[in-house]
Amino acid sequence: MANILAVDDEPDILALIKRALEKDSHLVTTAESPDQINLKTLNYYNLILLDVMMPGTNGFTFCQKVRDLVDCPILFLTAKTMESDVMYGLGLGADDYIKKPFSTGELRARVNAHLRREKREKRNVLLLPGFEFNLAAKELTAKGQKIPLTKKEYGICEFLANNHGQVFSKDQIYDAVCGYDAEGDSFTVAVHIKNIRAKLAVYQLSPISTVWGIGYKWD
């Protein structure tokens, strides 16, 4: 699952993109103009789809403006397929382009290929919608802010996020984070999760849900 931004001045195209990518459980934010986008939110996205020909700020101009602000893939959606146009767009920092009209199958395949590639290349970073885990430094960033977690709190977050969507009992979480031979009580997991939730609530985030009678999961 990835957080994707799609920018196109045609509402029908945006609706098609949203329907197609949501089939792969991606979260899709749409905008009809680059001028509607808050640049401070760009780091939340794992991939950007950007139309070239738009009134006002066009795709080339917007790509050039934000390329230094984000390191996620930028894919142009374009009817302009002359080699000079493609080379110009890639020279501005785009990673690929998709020719209009495109099929939903091609769109999904190209988007997922780029997301897989990003996951391979960023081995020390785990990206989930709204969150960035620095696996080397053991740090969690949310909405551009470093979250002040203790070692155990970070360990729980990283374990659940690495296995997002799966449910784990307190005992399983305790063993994964503290080790099978650790001295302590799995009851402390519930306390740590309570503290994690309080720290993330400051940013209106609640990724850890309780599955009653079973345990917890990162949604």
Image (cartoon, rainbow, N blue to C red):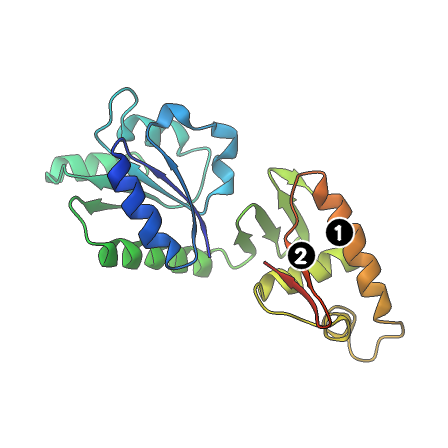
| Badge 1 amino acid | Ile
Count of numbered circles on the image: 2
User: Of tags 2 and 1, which is closer to the observer?
Assistant: 2
Let me know if residue 46 appears in the view: yes
Q: Residue at the spot x=43%, y=58% of the render? A: 25
Q: Identify whether 75 is placed above or below 215.
A: above
Q: Mark 2–mark 1 contact, CB under 8 Å?
A: yes
Q: Residue 151's quadrant in the figure?
A: bottom right
Q: Residue 196 — which label? A: 1
| Rendered location of residue 210, percent (x, y) | 70, 62
| Rendered location of residue 49, percent (x, y) | 33, 42
Q: Which residue is mark 2?
A: 208
Q: Residue 18 — which label? A: none
| Rendered location of residue 189, percent (x, y) | 80, 64
Q: Identify whether 79 is placed above or below 153.
A: above
Label 1 CA crowd tier, 10 Å (few <14, some 14–19, many 20+): many
| Label 1: element kind | helix
In the displayed structure image, the side of residue 31 where residue 174 appears, left or right = right
In the displayed structure image, the side of residue 73 where residue 212 appears, left or right = right
Q: Identify whether 216 is placed above or below 95.
A: below
Which residue is outermost to the top? 56
Q: Residue 57's quadrant in the figure?
A: top left
| Badge 2 amino acid | Ile
Label 2 CA crowd tier, 10 Å (few <14, some 14–19, many 20+): many
Q: Identify whether 170 is placed above or below 85.
A: below
Let me know if residue 151 appears in the view: no
Observer-nearest of 218 and 140: 218
